[in-house]
Image: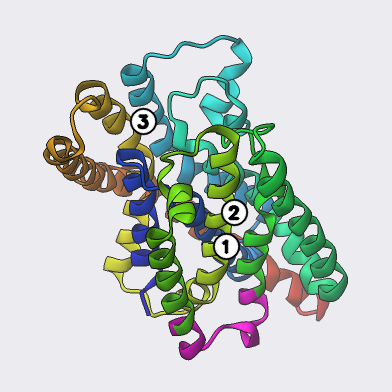
Amino acid sequence: MLPSGLFRLALTMLVVIQHFSRLSLALGAICLLFTISGFWLCKAWVERYSLCDKPYRTYLISRMWRILPVFWVCNVLGYLVVGVTFTKWVDLIPNSVVIGHSYLAHPALLPAWPLDIIVQFSLAAPLLCYLMAASPVVTGSAAMAIGALGLVTLLVWGGSGHVGIQRLNLLHFLVFFLAGMLVYLKPAWRPGARAASLSALATVVAICVALLQPDPRSALFGGPLSGPEFLFRNHLLNVALAGLALPFAMNCLFSDSSPLDRAAGDLSYIIYLIHWPICVLTNQHYASLPAVDRLPYVGGAIILTIGLSVMLLLVWSRLAEQPRRAFVARRLAAGRSGARVHGLASAGLS
């Protein structure tokens, strides 16, 4: 199976490909990225942040420290390239701290809407972890029911044109986050290698069948479909494909991870954001060309995206990630020291 970092990178490239072409598989890829986020945030809370001094505060500071620097850089680039302007001063909030970004009328960094949803989940993840551990059946059933309702809303209401893809929230995708959380909290639910292989095969076969049949193909490429009808069919197909691929994605989460794989995971986040200004520039100059003539420019734009992402990763790792990890390590050491003192005091040895 693919290590989780490489899998995240592959999913990110599906989003990039959609923005440079007509192939619309980004929503399914994003759903699986939400599952990966659910797993890792739950794991990080249970195994690290819950042991820190001032755990929830440390967790939130660390999350925003990890998310915001790259977002700020790419958002500024987006404003320089896309050329949108603030319509309300309240727009400064989502453009500064991400929360509410999916409701911006004219975002400079259009693909950042899932980042808003991840931040929403980040705020609730520790509480969900606690409730899942304290009362797994009740909490899991209630959360899954809410998540299923949100998913139906995504498919029906959102696809009917009442909610655009940028006006979505955590409830629409909660079921995917919960799937990642549950597979961490319940290791027995981890899909085996055979189930993961069948999941990958079924997903590939489903995509091939969709490409060969006129109606499903139009749900992937548009063509005769447009507007709400295309959104509905595309949402439905993408969610179905994400569901098929879920066992494979879950299995990848347990693969051995090397430093190179972790770097690939970090790189995927930067590629996901920075490709948009480059995509906009490419479309501004070459969108009118025939598809074959556009291909070299698109290829060059993707290479430029990866190159800039690698450069930004090196800077980000040194200026943001290393200090963030040192901060968390200090809070973790303080938390363990405090727990040790409390244990001694309880035993009457202090």
Residue type at mark 2: give it: Leu
Q: Which disc is residue 236 wearing?
A: 2
**Image-based side of 260 in relation to 239, left or right:** left
Q: On screen, 137 above or below 104?
A: below
The residue positioned 37% from the left and 65% from the top of the image is 5
**Label 3's element?**
helix
Q: Residue at x 44, y 41 (%)?
A: 222
Q: Residues within 10 Å of mark 3 (few under 14, many from 20)?
A: some
Q: Position of residue 310 (x, y in %)?
A: 22, 48
Residue occupied by mark 1: 240
Residue 73: mark in rendering = 3
Q: Is residue 81 left or right of residue 192?
A: left
Asked whether the residues under the numbered discs 3 and 1 touch, taking CB atoms below 8 Å apart as contact, a structural biologist would say: no
| Circle on res. 130 | none
**Is residue 266 depicted above or below 248 in this figure?**
above
Can residue 286 be seen? Answer: yes
> Given contact means CB atoms under 8 Å apart, are the residues at marks 1 and 2 in contact?
yes
Q: Quadrant of the C terminus?
A: bottom right
Q: Which residues are magenta?
A: 183-197
Front residue of 102 and 211 = 211
Q: Position of residue 30 (x, y in %)?
A: 50, 52
Q: Secondary structure at mark 2?
A: helix
> Toward the viewer: 252 or 120?
252
Question: Which badge, 3 or 2, is on the more N-terminal residue?
Answer: 3
Q: CA distance from mark 3 to mark 1?
A: 34 Å
Using the numbered discs, state the Cα–Cα distance from disc 3 to disc 2 in whole angstroms.
34 Å
Q: Residues within 10 Å of mark 2 (few under 14, many from 20)?
A: many
Q: Is residue 21 magenta?
A: no
Indicate left or right for 153 with 304 as reference.
right
Neighbours of disc 1 within 10 Å: few (<14), some (14-19), many (20+)? some
For residue 4, above or below residue 102: below
